[in-house]
């Protein structure tokens, strides 16, 4: 009896270690995150997104690979000549899959808002009415889910700036939020070491936004 | 001992995978045999894989051994798997073909007769916002549709007239449920409006013929309005207008939302400032209360409720031709309620379910001088339907409907009343079959049964669409459409059967980035139209014997990209229609079917002024009428209708809109027909009176303020 218990405990510990620090998962994620930061064309973007999707499929209890696959698709849709609506939609689908693994996740909520912001930007005149409240709501929710998430604040600031530009009001509010975001990035950077695979992007955007009021 | 063995195997197995290396190479092709880049090719359950290159070529190494599953996955294509055996060395795979999924985005859609307003879908003609910002529409859905091909403006009526059909031939649906008395009741040639605010809807599907078997009891046209889904935020909307005001409050959570709206309008102050050509004793007035609620259900369904009650009226002197008097006083009071609820759910295995119930109740009390009349119309509609996608190529729609329709009219002073009760049941099914991404066939059948006319019928419908080029497509639609006569006739002759129409439509649609061109030719036949002896006011001997046709073609061109911040569309519709109906003894051009119809709508956004300027211009060649001073029927035509409308929307703050509009800026004296005396005067001449507009122009000024925590929200849809 004792023996079996030992085996069960051993297996359980081992399994949980795999989940937390599966070295193969870690290193695959790290190398793809590096590749993601060097994407220069559509093909490279598809390669990275596909690689994340492979990692996601082999690790069905991890939300991060789906998160990064979605992020790669969103960034690709903003940067390259692809079927943008389709890419944003498929990113949202991936985010929804990831949310089932990790519900109430501030990073996923913020990314969902980011994808929707991308869709809005394709046809702001007719989509603005229905989508901009949804985007604002998602960013607001993301901030509430994790007040330390600098990406949620940065994206909210970006949305605020777009609105201010459309309606011709000043960028002060957006800048203020960007400055808060910069502080959050600072405290986030303290956590980052070479094994850190959680999202860290967005600091450049926050810096740019904060400069708008100088 | 046992433990050790187990542990040994555990470690051994987890290390086992690191041995051999197999190199896999191959090519992924699309259905045309061209290399397909971007395909995710990998060994199932491992990290080993790659993405196909520009020529569809791929090559990667795997450490997996033995029998493995190779997966090919790409967005928009059917994922495929192949079993392979990895035992080191190099495996050269045969070319692998991926089949593209047919989706709404890449497949051809049937566009014959159809015009859609939506933010989401492709092949839309308008966006929902376009409906509310069309200057001549003054915020009325139907007013905006009157700038689309296949319609004609009948300015003394205000309802929707499609391709030589009368206004009753348009069926109006909200979320698939029929709306009884969708237009406000009116009298004395004062044009009406749709009762429902465009704000309620996220999308509009307007068909000018050849439409789905889902819709029946409409000879010419189906107008399907789809209500919004969940609201996302709590807000209040205040509107102050030159003709009234209203307030709307929305409560929202993640799972449900509720909007309550109340409006009051009264044209009296307006009419005191702006003189009217019509002799109003009491200007039109009314109030309405509306509730709209949406709830996401636990099992993934969506439940909606829409309820509305309203009341209004007016008093108007109806001048008689050849008379100097004020004429007869028409005193109109209207009471209307509509409620509907529906539930929908996307289920498993490609099934989508829908169930709904709707009821509308309309009461008109109209006094002509001292004569009191009453009309009561009640319609209940029950519907259940299901869609099944068997694959991306074949889908089926099936539904059952039941209507209970009661109508009564009477003279309360002498206690006289007549009424009818009709139970109608329908079954419909429709099948879409994609032979390829370029070619789709649709076949539908609608069966109906009426208890009152003791009649059952079958309406087959058919359409197909073929993609000629990436942007151009051709559609063809044909079908039979049945509709029971209007209540006023049925109550007098309860055995009246369906009127029938056959449609044949050929459509060409070209859609590029920001540019739409649409051309459509049609032929419609009419059988069993209602004819009678006597006059329209007092028909006698009603019978299903009228016949007719409508044929013509229309063009639509829209350009949103060539001129910066400017969007315009141009429509021309030609209708040649003749029918024997009502009191006419021969086939005549109906008074509601002008032959040439033209309209232009232009909208321009001026960024520094934070303003959108809009202009719309409509023109037709005049309405046929019968002048009894000359031989024959429908022997004369009015001079052409013209209307230039302008609007200005100013957004000084994100949550504030100021909107000003004026119709018929040029003050053209439009005439929609003539009333004649029933007897000639002493010189032997039938004297006439022109049926014109209530006033040369209509001016509108409105302020719309949105109150919410999020100051950027505004009521753009209320423009």
Image (cartoon, coloured by chain):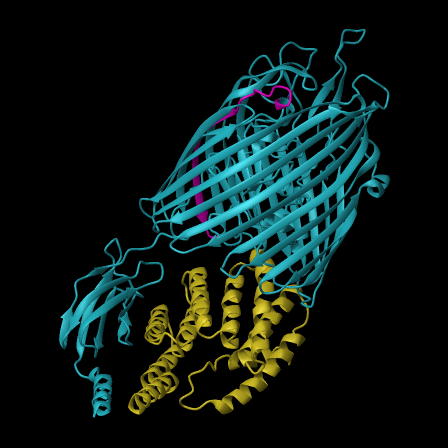
Chain colours: A yellow, B cyan
Is there any visible trace of residue B622 in the rendered image?
Answer: no
Tell me which corner region of the image, top left, top right, bottom left or bottom right, holds residue B327.
top right
What residue sits 62% from the left and 36% below the top?
B379
Examine the rendered structure and indicate whether residue B10 appears above or below residue B356.
Answer: below
Examine the rendered structure and indicate whether residue A150 appears above or below residue B214.
Answer: below
In this rendering, would B680 be left or right of A186? right
Residue B493 magenta-highlighted: yes
Whole-percent x, y for residue B178 in the image: 57, 39
Q: In this orientation, which residue lies closer to the viewer: B297 or B33?
A: B297
In this rendering, would B172 be left or right of A11? right
Whole-percent x, y for residue A198 in the image: 45, 82
Q: In this orientation, which residue lies closer to the viewer: B455 or B641?
A: B455
In the image, the segment drawn in magenta is B490-513
Whole-percent x, y for residue B285 in the image: 79, 40
Image quadrant containing the N terminus of chain B: bottom left
In this rendering, would B457 be left or right of B325? left
Q: Give the number of callouts.
A: 0
Examine the rendered structure and indicate whether residue B373 appears above or below residue B22.
Answer: above
Q: Residue furthest front?
A: A1
In this rendering, would A198 be left or right of B191? left
Residue B43 magenta-highlighted: no
Examine the rendered structure and indicate whether residue A170 appears above or below residue B182.
Answer: below
Whole-percent x, y for residue B90 in the image: 14, 74
What residue sits 46% from the left and 34% below the top?
B210
């Amino acid at each position: 009896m004792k023996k079996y218990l030992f085996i069960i405990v051993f297996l359980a510990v081992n399994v949980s270690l795999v989940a937390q620090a599966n070295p193969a998962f870690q290193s695959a994620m790290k190398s793809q995150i590096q590749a993601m930061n060097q994407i220069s064309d559509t093909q490279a973007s598809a390669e990275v997104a596909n690689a994340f999707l492979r990692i996601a499929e082999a690790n069905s209890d991890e939300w991060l690979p789906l998160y990064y696959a979605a992020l790669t698709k969103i960034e690709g849709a903003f940067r390259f000549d692809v079927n943008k609506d389709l890419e944003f939609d498929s990113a949202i689908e991936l985010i929804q899959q990831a949310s089932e693994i990790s519900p109430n996740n501030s990073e996923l909520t913020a990314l969902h808002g980011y994808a929707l912001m991308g869709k809005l930007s394709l046809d702001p005149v007719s989509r603005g009415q229905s989508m901009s409240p949804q985007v604002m709501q998602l960013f607001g929710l993301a901030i509430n889910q994790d007040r330390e998430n600098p990406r949620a604040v940065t994206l909210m600031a970006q949305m605020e700036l777009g609105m201010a530009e459309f309606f011709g009001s000043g960028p002060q509010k957006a800048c203020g939020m960007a400055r808060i975001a910069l502080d959050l990035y600072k405290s986030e950077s303290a956590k980052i070491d070479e094994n850190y695979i959680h999202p860290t992007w967005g600091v450049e955007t926050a810096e740019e936004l904060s400069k708008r009021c100088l | 001992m046992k433990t050790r063995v187990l542990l040994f195997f555990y470690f051994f197995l987890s290390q086992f995978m690191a041995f051999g290396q197999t190199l896999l190479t191959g090519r992924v092709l699309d259905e045309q045999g061209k290399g397909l880049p971007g395909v995710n090719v990998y060994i199932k359950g491992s990290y080993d894989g790659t993405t196909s290159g520009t020529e569809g070529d791929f090559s990667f190494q795997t450490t997996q051994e033995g029998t493995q599953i190779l997966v090919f996955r790409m967005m928009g294509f059917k994922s495929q798997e192949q079993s392979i055996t990895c035992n080191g060395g190099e495996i050269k795979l045969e070319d692998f073909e991926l089949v593209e999924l047919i989706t709404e985005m890449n497949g051809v859609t049937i566009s014959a007769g159809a015009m859609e307003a939506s933010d989401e879908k492709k092949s839309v003609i308008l966006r929902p916002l376009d409906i509310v910002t069309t200057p001549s529409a003054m915020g009325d859905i139907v007013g905006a549709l009157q700038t689309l091909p296949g319609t004609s403006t009948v300015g003394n009526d205000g309802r929707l007239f499609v391709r030589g059909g009368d206004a009753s031939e348009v069926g109006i649906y909200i979320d698939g449920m029929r709306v009884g008395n969708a237009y406000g009741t009116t009298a004395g040639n004062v044009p009406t409006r749709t009762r429902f605010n465009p704000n309620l809807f996220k999308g509009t599907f307007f068909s000018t013929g050849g439409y789905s078997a889902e819709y029946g009891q409409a000879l010419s046209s189906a107008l399907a309005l789809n209500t919004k889904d969940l609201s996302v935020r709590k807000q209040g909307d205040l509107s102050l207008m030159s003709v009234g005001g209203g307030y709307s409050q929305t409560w929202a959570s993640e799972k449900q939302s509720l909007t309550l709206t109340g409006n009051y309008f009264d044209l009296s102050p307006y009419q005191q400032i702006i003189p009217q050509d019509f002799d109003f004793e009491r200007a039109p007035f009314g109030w309405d209360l509306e509730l709209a609620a949406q709830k996401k259900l636990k099992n993934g369904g969506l439940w909606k409720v829409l309820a509305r009650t309203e009341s209004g009226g007016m008093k108007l002197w109806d001048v008689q031709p050849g008379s100097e008097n004020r004429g007869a006083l028409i005193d109109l009071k209207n009471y209307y309620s509509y409620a509907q609820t529906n539930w929908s759910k996307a289920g498993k295995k490609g099934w989508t379910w829908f169930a709904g119930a709707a009821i509308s109740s309309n009461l008109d009390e109209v006094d002509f001088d001292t004569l009191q009349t009453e009309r009561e119309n009640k319609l209940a509609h029950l519907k259940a339907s299901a869609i099944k996608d068997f694959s991306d190529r074949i889908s089926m729609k099936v539904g059952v409907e039941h209507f209970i329709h009661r109508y009564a009219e009477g003279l309360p002073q002498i206690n006289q009343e007549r009424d009818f009760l009709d139970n109608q049941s329908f079954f419909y099914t429709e099948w879409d079959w994609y032979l390829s991404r370029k070619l789709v066939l649709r076949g539908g059948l609608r069966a109906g049964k009426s208890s009152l006319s003791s009649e059952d019928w079958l309406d087959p419908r058919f359409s197909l669409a073929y993609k000629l080029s990436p942007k151009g497509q051709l559609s063809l639609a044909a079908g039979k459409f049945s509709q029971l006569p209007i209540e006023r006739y049925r109550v007098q002759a309860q055995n009246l059967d369906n009127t029938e129409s056959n449609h044949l439509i050929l459509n060409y649609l070209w859609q590029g980035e920001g540019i739409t061109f649409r051309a459509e030719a049609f032929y419609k036949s009419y059988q069993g139209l209602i004819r009678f002896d006597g006059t329209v006011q007092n028909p006698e001997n009603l019978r299903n014997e009228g016949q007719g046709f409508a044929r013509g073609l229309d063009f639509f061109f829209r350009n949103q990209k060539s001129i910066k911040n400017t969007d315009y569309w141009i429509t021309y519709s030609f209708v040649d229609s003749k029918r024997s109906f009502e009191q006419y003894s021969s086939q005549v051009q109906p008074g509601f079917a002008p032959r040439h119809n033209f309209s232009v709508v232009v909208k321009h956004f001026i960024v520094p002024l934070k303003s959108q300027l809009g202009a719309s211009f409509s023109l037709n060649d005049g309405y046929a009428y019968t002048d009894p001073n000359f031989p024959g029927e429908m022997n004369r035509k009015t001079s052409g209708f013209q209307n230039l409308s302008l609007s200005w929307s100013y957004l000084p703050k994100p949550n504030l809109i100021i909107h000003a509009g004026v119709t018929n800026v040029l003050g053209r004296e439009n005439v929609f027909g003539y009333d004649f005396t029933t007897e000639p005067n002493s010189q032997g001449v039938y004297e006439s009176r022109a049926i014109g507009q209530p006033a040369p122009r209509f001016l509108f000024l409105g302020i719309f303020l949105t109150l919410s925590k999020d100051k950027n929200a505004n009521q753009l849809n209320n423009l």
